Image (tube, grey):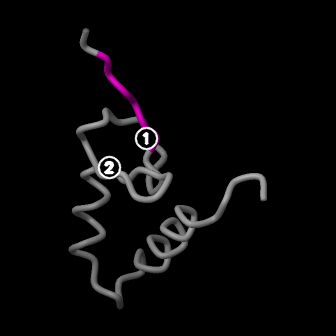
Amino acid sequence: MDQTTIHQCTICGKPKLEGEGIRIVLGFICADCETEMVHTDVKDAKYPFFIHQMKQLFVEKNA
């Protein structure tokens, strides 16, 4: 039986298949966002956005 699990990326919000990214805590980061984050300089304008989105991985929902 081939079950396909789809997760929503914490960074971009797009649905991706299980094998197309990484699971962190209770969240998911797609491979595209992971690659972009790794290559983003701390002085880049998009860096604070990534930090904000990553914080969502550690915030408990409905707390």
| Count of numbered marks | 2
- Quadrant where the C terminus is found in the figure: bottom right
Picture coordinates of residue 6 (x, y %)? 39, 30
- Residue 3: numbered disc: none
Q: From the image, tell me which residue sits under label 2.
A: 30
Label 2 neighbourhood size at 10 Å, few (<14), some (14-19), many (20+)? Answer: many
Residue that appears at 25% across and 51% down: 31
Residue that appears at 25% across and 13% down: 2
Q: Amino acid at mark 1?
A: Lys
Give the extent of the magenta segment. 3-8
Residue that appears at 57% across and 63% down: 56
Label 1 neighbourhood size at 10 Å, few (<14), some (14-19), many (20+)? Answer: few
- Tell me if residue 36 comes above or below residue 18 in the rendering: below
Picture coordinates of residue 59 (x, y %)? 63, 65
Task: Locate residue 16: give its quadrant.
Answer: top left
Q: Amino acid at mark 2?
A: Cys
Q: Secondary structure at mark 2?
A: strand
Q: From the image, tell me which residue sits under label 1.
A: 14
For the residues bearing labels 2 and 1, Cβ distance under 8 angstroms:
yes
Q: How far apart are the alpha carbons under marks 2 and 1? A: 8 Å
Picture coordinates of residue 11 (x, y %)? 45, 57
- Tell me if residue 4 comes above or below residue 1 in the rendering: below
Q: Secondary structure at mark 1?
A: loop
Badge 2 or badge 1: first in the primary sequence: 1
- Quadrant where the N terminus is found in the figure: top left
